[in-house]
Image: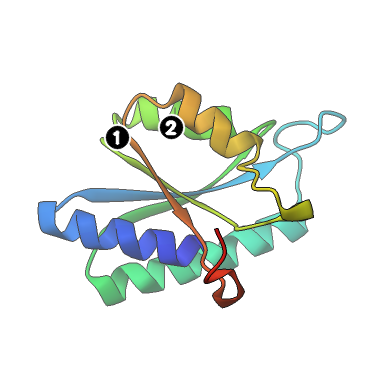
Amino acid sequence: MDVEAFRLACGMGRETKSKLYALYVIEVKRELPVDAEVTGETVKGEEILAEIEAVSREERCDVTAEILQARQAGPAIIHEAVERNVDLIVAGTPHERPGNSFHLGGTICYILENAPCPVMLWREYRAADSGQA
């Protein structure tokens, strides 16, 4: 899902020769220092960002990829967007249907409510969803 959202961003950014920023936010529990070493999450983040960087080379896009540690992903993403004066946030969200309902989740809702710029959501597609309302 994140890679497909990034491909979309690459396509748009390539046309305008934009600089892209890819963030992987590790949410650190309150009982730990925010800069605590969270090896498993760091390895996962590095793998995802390596894949993002490979896509950026394939798509010929300029990207800066970073891992951030924060208490909550939403505020960290908004802080980075403000600091970097971004023109658009592209976010991916899974298509989960617990009990046949649709839920965006706290991070996406926070981004939508607080973004200093337009936000584009990429929701994953599952073939089993076709034909459903």
At which x and y percent is residue 64? Answer: 36, 52
Question: Which coloring applies here?
Answer: rainbow
Residue 47 x/y as whole percent: 58, 68
For label 1, the SS is loop
Q: Residue at x 55, y 58 (%)?
A: 133
**Residue shown at 46% from the left, 66% from the top:** 3
Left or right relative to 121: residue 118: left
As displayed, is residue 93 above or below residue 81? below
Does 120 sit above or below residue 11? Answer: above
Residue 55, x across and y down, in percent? 36, 72
Q: Is residue 62 visible?
A: yes
Front in this rendered view, residue 8 or 70? 8
For the question of whether residue 73 can be seen, the reply is: no
Position above or below: 15 against 74: below
Residue farthest toward the left in the current orientation of the protein: 16
**Sequence-wise first label, 2 or 1:** 2
Residue for point 29% across, 77% down = 58
Q: Position of residue 105 (x, y in %)?
A: 65, 40
| CB atoms of marks 2 and 1 within 8 Å | yes
Q: Amino acid at mark 1?
A: Val
**Element type at marker 2?**
helix
The residue under label 2 is 80
Front-most of residues 12 and 65: 12
Q: CA distance from mark 2 to mark 1?
A: 8 Å
Q: Residue at x 55, y 76 (%)?
A: 127
Residue 26, located in which quarter of the rendered image? top right
The crowd level at tag 2 (other Cα within 10 Å; few <14, some 14-19, many 20+) is: some
Q: Which residue is mark 1?
A: 86
Q: Would residue 58 appear left or right of 52 to someone viewing this image?
A: left
Q: Amino acid at mark 2?
A: Glu
